Amino acid sequence: MILAYLLILAELVIVSWIDIKIKKISNFWFVINIVLTMFFHICLSEVYEFDWTLFIMPISWVIVGFFLFLSKIMGAGDSKYLASLFIAVPVQYHLGLFENLVYSTIVVGLMTILISLIRDFKKIKAYAFSNYWQGLKEFIGSRFSYGPVILLAWLMLGFKIWK
């Protein structure tokens, strides 16, 4: 499991960096996760069981990700990437990773909003007093890079696994 954890960690560091730089997670990473999954199931079969329960969280994440995309919290590539990441993660860690994703999304989202409020307070105040609701709506609906959120959730899972 250590090899799998480290390979996924390395991938998440790269994906996070790219997501911060260009604000997009390519479909290329979906393919990488599928290849990693096949490698893990062949070489680490004692940890990676292949049955229908492997697909519960990925399918759920596509549905949840669609609503997060509609609410402008996450991009479409982020949702596809997460679905493929859950396929690459052993089933016994799915729930823990999901919990960590919820926590890290809330923490990073609130920090992002707070930083934006502090940084753009004058602009937000001007929008509110001038009744320019479209500007206020754009400010509230701004996305943040989700790759680092996934990385944070993965690191938290690692601390739970090896504490």
Image (cartoon, grey):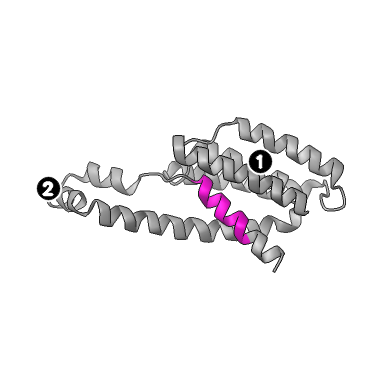
Would residue 62 be seen by someone viewing this image from the given angle? Answer: no
Against 21, residue 93 (above or below) is below
Q: Can residue 67 be seen here?
A: yes
Give the residue drawn at x 47%, y 44%.
74
Label placed on residue 84: 1
Magenta highlight on residue 152: yes
Q: Residues within 10 Å of mark 1 (few under 14, many from 20)?
A: many
Residue depth check, mark 2 versus mark 1: number of the one nearer the observer:
1
Front residue of 107/128: it is 107
The answer to which image quadrant residue 71 occupies is: top left
For the residue carrying disc 2, how many other residues have a C-alpha within 10 Å: few (<14), some (14-19), or many (20+)?
few
Q: Could you tell me which quadrant the C terminus lies in?
A: bottom right
Farthest bottom residue? 163
Q: What type is the residue that disc 1 sits on?
A: Ser
Q: Point out which mark residue 130 bears.
A: 2
| Residue 112: image location, x then y, percent | 38, 54
Regarding mark 1 in the picture, which secondary structure is present there? helix
Q: Which mark is residue 28?
A: none
Q: Could you tell whether 8 is left or right of 121 in the image?
A: right
Evaluate if marks 2 and 1 touch, with contact meaning CB atoms under 8 Å apart: no
**Residue lying at 59% horizontally and 38% vertically, measured from the top left:** 80
Task: Compare residues 71 and 161 and report the one nearer the observer.
Answer: 161
In x, y percent, where is residue 91? 75, 53
Q: Give the left or right position of residue 43, taking residue 100 as reference.
A: right
N-term-proximal mark, 2 vs 1: 1
Q: Is residue 133 left or right of residue 85?
A: left
Q: CA distance from mark 2 to mark 1?
A: 45 Å
The image quarter containing residue 32 is top right
Instruction: Write the residue at 71% across / 63% down.
Output: 161
Q: Amino acid at mark 2?
A: Ser
Q: Which residues are magenta?
A: 146-156
